Amino acid sequence: MRQTYLASEERRIAYFTCLGWLRNFDLFLANSKYTSARLGALLDIHEHRRMVTGVAVRDSLAPTQSSPSAPAAPVILVVGGGDPRKNPEVALVAHGRSSRLAAAGISLLVSGGYPESMQRDLRQLHVRAGGNSELLQFLPKVPDEELRSCYADALCTVAPSRIEGFSIPIVEASANGCPVLAANCAAQAELLAAPEDLFDPDDAETLRERLEQIALNPSARETARAASRHMAALHLKGGWKAVLAGHARADPRAGSGRSTRQASAPRFSVADAARSLGGGRLFLRHPRTTGGASRS
């Protein structure tokens, strides 16, 4: 698999340097159990120094008290983005293969502000899967108020990402009464209690079947919506201040704003870390010095 995120030596060095300095903190507030576990695995941080906060839905995306307006046309919302891990392709193939969704005139709306060149490629994929090009739309970057309306109006929101640290769109959609289907990466699986609301990120056929169930069957849609209501409520109680205040009460260090010990240099050599990734001639400024360069 092609390396995307740490493709250059410079990026790998920066990454390992950051890992080294992270060890200097006393308390880690992770946004999910998955993120907390990764901190433990990568940095050998004991669980008593890790706390899971979750993420609060910001006020501008919280549901309003006004009566929802009827959407102009039935639509399924896909959470996208320019990063390859967002994986909108599986949703486009699933929708394109569904003659039932097409017959019902149900469109696919892909968020993420994709540029025209990427839209073109995704449109071609949708057509190759059998889709009607008139039933595929792309959402530009929009203000929160419009995004909230998209969540509220959609028959379903699909979060197909291969990996996330949390998955804010899941709680945003759920908070606005929209059923959610999500790829089964660890962080997203934490947020959806019903196994049938999760799918393999490469399994377009299972996703197609589940989309048809939710979009075409009001009873199934209400069941999926109800499954996420409790989770959504947990992320609407008081917003960010409540999240932070709760953890400050649980551990005073969370709100002290200072560490209980002095910062020290990374516990491993940046040069040694670089060698483990294939070596090469490196010119580094060591974090402990104010001048000069280290060479390896």
Image: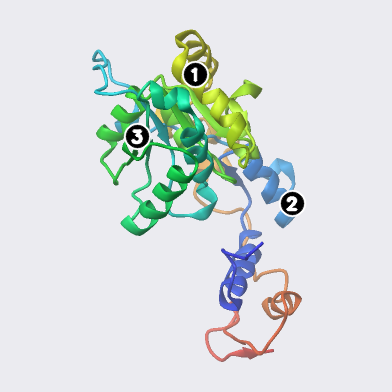
Rate crowding at label 2 as few (under 14), some (14 to 19) or many (20 or more) other CA atoms within 10 Å.
few
Looking at this view, is 205 or 240 the one in front? 205
Give the residue displayed 74% in from the left and 78% down from the top. 272
Dot in front, 1 or 2: 1
- Which numbered disc, 3 or 1, marks the residue that appears first in the sequence? 3
Q: Picture coordinates of residue 37 (x, y %)?
A: 70, 44
Determine whether the residue tagged by mark 1 lies in a helix, strand or loop: helix
Q: Picture coordinates of residue 259 (x, y %)?
A: 58, 54
Quadrant in which the C terminus is drawn: bottom right
- Which numbered disc, 3 or 2, marks the residue that appears first in the sequence? 2
Q: Amino acid under label 1? A: Ile
- Compared to residue 38, the image places residue 195 above or below, namely above
Q: Which residue is mark 3?
A: 135
Q: Which residue is mark 1?
A: 214
Colour scheme in use? rainbow
What label does residue 41 carry, if any?
2
- Which numbered disc, 1 or 2, marks the residue that appears first in the sequence? 2
Q: Picture coordinates of residue 67 (x, y %)?
A: 25, 13
Q: Amino acid under label 3? A: Leu
Looking at this view, is 268 or 110 the one in front? 110
What label does residue 119 carry, if any?
none
Determine whether the residue tagged by mark 3 lies in a helix, strand or loop: helix
Examine the image and state in which quarter residue 44 appears: bottom right
Rate crowding at label 1 as few (under 14), some (14 to 19) or many (20 or more) other CA atoms within 10 Å.
many
Q: Picture coordinates of residue 31 (x, y %)?
A: 55, 40
Dot in front, 3 or 1: 3
Q: Are marks 3 and 2 in contact (CB under 8 Å)?
A: no
The Cα–Cα distance between marks 1 and 2, rounded to whole angstroms, is: 38 Å
- Compared to residue 280, the image places residue 110 above or below, namely above
Quadrant in which the N terminus is drawn: bottom right
